[in-house]
Amino acid sequence: MRLLKLILRVGLALVGGSLVGKFAMNKSSNQYEELKQPPLSPPGIVFPIVWSALYAAMGIAYHIVKESKANKDVSIIYYTQLGLNYLWSFLYFKFRLRGLALIEVFTLLASVILTTVRFYEKNKVAGLMLIPYICWVAFATYLNAGGWYLNREKSCK
């Protein structure tokens, strides 16, 4: 039963992220490459690889915390940050609201930090597993800010 719960928790994050990637992108699958990018921007192929690893780590960390009989607020915090994570792609790519996406990514970063702290309080390993997620979202915040600034004329007003 524990293995099934682990598979479901990891699967939810991975499948959700995959579906968001599929549906949030506009018909032009090369949108990322078509946008001006700030320095240090990785090639587009990096994102699905990194996000898959991060979603898997999120699911595993959440499973560890849930199995330690964490209270309901941990689930609320976890699913809030996951929802914010999924929302960002729609704002930035589908709706091209890059300024709003920038505000949202700061909210996401705060939510990820809060989730990490709460997980760490419940289980140190689970909390430490989310440190790369914090780093990546901080980097994504930089990329979003640069993308917004460099592509202001391509954003929805």
Image (tube, rainbow, N blue to C red):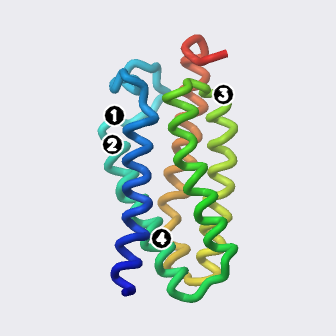
Residue 19 is left or right of residue 114, and the answer is left
Say what amino acid the circle numbered 3 marks: Gly
Q: Quadrant of residue 25?
A: top left
**Is label 3 in contact with label 2 (beta carbons under 8 Å)?**
no
Residue 106 is left or right of residue 56, and the answer is right
Circle 2 crowding by C-alpha within 10 Å: few under 14, some 14–19, many from 20: few
**Is label 1 in contact with label 2 (beta carbons under 8 Å)?**
yes
Q: Secondary structure at mark 4?
A: helix
Residue under circle 3?
Answer: 99
Residue under circle 4?
Answer: 129
Work out whether mark 4 precedes mark 1 in sequence or the reverse, and give the earlier one. Answer: 1
Q: CA distance from mark 3 to mark 2?
A: 23 Å
Q: Residue at x 40, y 51 (%)?
A: 51
Residue under circle 2?
Answer: 46
Q: Secondary structure at mark 2?
A: helix
Q: Residue at x 52, y 42 (%)?
A: 140
Q: Quadrant of the N terminus?
A: bottom left
Work out whether mark 3 precedes mark 2 in sequence or the reverse, and give the earlier one. Answer: 2
Q: Secondary structure at mark 3?
A: helix
Q: Is residue 75 above or below residue 110?
A: below
Residue under circle 1?
Answer: 43
